[in-house]
Image (cartoon, helix red, strand yellow):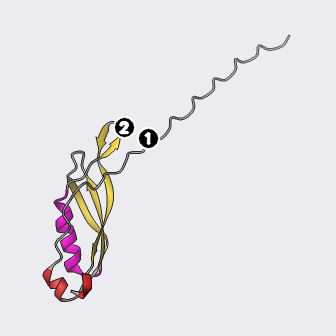
């Protein structure tokens, strides 16, 4: 006689799709003040900040990811963005902490 056959193996359910949170959004915020001394020195450049945003849109932490090469400009960008409000990241209908990169460009118009 034949041995009894094993029941068919149950198929594993397909993996659930990954839920990737939407990144925080900038919202409306004032531009950083161009430091007077940096203007006089003719300093220009772009600072890129890495900003961690809380569920209520406040800045929880920030750091210079890429320096402009001028400490005055980097500090002005940090000071301004620290006070900004963001639209928090979302995961479905829920607000979540998230991180966003914020480029801040300091450029003298017309050589002033």
Question: Does residue 68 appear left or right of residue 59 in this picture?
Answer: right
Please identify the residue farthest to the front as the structure is shown: 110
Residue drawn at x 77%, y 13% as measured from the top left? 4
Please identify the residue farthest to the left as the structure is shown: 36
Between 29 and 92, the one lying in front of the other is 29
Q: For residue 40, which quarter of the picture?
A: bottom left
Residue assigned mark 2: 92
Q: On residue 101, which mark appears?
A: none
- Mark 2 closeness class: few <14, some 14–19, many ≥20 residues within 10 Å: few
Please identify the residue farthest to the top as the structure is shown: 1
Lower position in the chain sequence, tag 2 or tag 1 = 1
Between 40 and 13, the one lying in front of the other is 40
Residue drawn at x 57%, y 29% as measured from the top left? 13
Which one is closest to the eye, mark 2 or mark 1? Answer: 2
Total tally of numbered discs in the picture: 2
Q: Secondary structure at mark 2?
A: loop
- Image position, residue 81 (x, y; %): 21, 63
Q: Secondary structure at mark 1?
A: loop
Q: Is residue 81 magenta?
A: yes
- Image position, residue 84 (x, y; %): 19, 58
Task: Find out whether the residues at labels 2 and 1 contact each other: C-beta distance under 8 Å.
Answer: yes
Please provide the residue range marked out in magenta: 69-84
Q: Is residue 43 magenta?
A: no
Residue assigned mark 1: 19
Residue drawn at x 20%, y 54% as measured from the top left? 85
Q: CA distance from mark 2 to mark 1?
A: 8 Å
- Image position, residue 24 (x, y; %): 31, 51
Q: Specify the quadrant that holds the C terminus.
A: bottom left
Residue drawn at x 37%, y 47% as measured from the top left? 22
Please identify the dominant SS of the magenta region: helix
Q: For residue 111, which quarter of the picture?
A: bottom left
- Image position, residue 86 (x, y; %): 24, 53
């Amino acid at each position: 006689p034949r041995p009894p056959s094993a029941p068919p193996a149950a198929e594993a359910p397909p993996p659930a799709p990954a839920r990737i949170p939407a990144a925080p959004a900038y919202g409306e915020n004032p531009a950083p003040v161009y430091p007077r001394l940096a203007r006089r020195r003719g300093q220009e450049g772009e600072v890129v900040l890495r900003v961690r945003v809380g569920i209520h849109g406040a800045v929880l932490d920030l750091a210079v990811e890429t320096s402009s090469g001028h400490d005055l400009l980097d500090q002005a960008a940090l000071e301004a963005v620290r006070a900004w409000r963001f639209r928090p990241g979302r995961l479905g209908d829920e607000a979540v902490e998230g991180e966003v990169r914020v480029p801040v460009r300091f450029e003298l118009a017309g050589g002033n």
